[in-house]
Image (cartoon, rainbow, N blue to C red):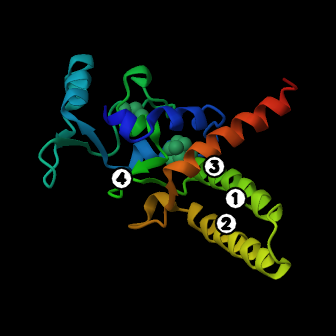
Amino acid sequence: MIRKAIRYSVIQNILQYYECPETCRAECCRNGRVHIFEDEFRVLTEEDKERTQNIGKDSLVPDLYVINNPCSFLSKSNRCEIYDKRPTVCGMYPFKVNSSGTSLGLQPCPLGFMIIQDLSSWVMDTISKLCIPDDVKSKKLEEWKTTLGSYAREVSEFHIRDTVNEMQIPFDELDMLSMYLFSKHTVKQGK
Ligand code: SF4
Ligand code: SF4
């Protein structure tokens, strides 16, 4: 139910086209505070009780648990050792739930920035085809270039900043990004 509400399957459709760069040392698992649900906590406990010692109840949201960093299920080679059973939050990162109920946040980590670049390409391509006055079109394209530049600056050391400027993506744009990536990769494979 929750996964449907947060467009989990659309996120998986998007993430299938990306791989985290080797240069990232799984900073999300190493430095993030990962929130999980009670049933997910139970799954991890069944998996390895010893390693759930660094998971505690969230002090602000009673129904949630927090994996304190670094996550004890992260291997020395920066792999998730419970990948097939990883919590929802882990499976959707760098997308993150926000309180709007109509959009998702996208963190500007190295992987998130790759997605932001593709989203920008799609939006700018769409804008360039619009039947609108040239000056309006140029202004919109410039705004997107500036937006992209601002996220590029966020990528460096995003994991040690207290706050990051995450991109908010409305659900309908998320759907369109998924379709854009599908068609882009289908064309590339010559299907
Ligand atoms: S999701 Fe982002 S922070 Fe996590 S390993 Fe991939 S690139 Fe690094
Ligand atoms: S459970 Fe796996 S994916 Fe989630 S934080 Fe831990 S190592 Fe990372």
Furthest residue toward right: 190
**Amino acid at pointer 1:** Ser
Secondary structure beneath dot 1 equals: helix
Q: Is residue 25 visible?
A: no
Please give the residue where the numbered disc 3 appears in the rendered image.
Answer: 115
Determine the secondary structure under disc 2: helix
Could you say which is closer to the camera, residue 189 or residue 102?
102
Seen in the picture, residue 160 relative to 81 is either above or below; the reply is: below
Q: Can the viewer see residue 148?
A: yes
Numbered disc in front, either 3 or 4: 4
Q: Amino acid at mark 2?
A: Leu
Please say if the residues under marks 2 and 1 sit with CB atoms less than 8 Å apart.
yes
Which quarter shows the N terminus?
A: top left
Q: Label 1: which residue? A: 120
Kind of residue at badge 4: Gly
The CA distance from mark 2 to mark 1 is 7 Å
Residue denoted by label 4: 101
Please, what secondary structure does the residue beneath circle 4 have? loop
Q: Is residue 142 left or right of residue 150?
A: right
Query: Which of disc 4 and disc 2 is earlier in sequence?
Result: 4
Which of the two residues, 4 or 106, is positioned nearer the viewer here? Answer: 4
Q: What's the residue type where badge 3 is placed? A: Ile
Q: Earlier in the sequence, mark 2 or mark 1?
A: 1
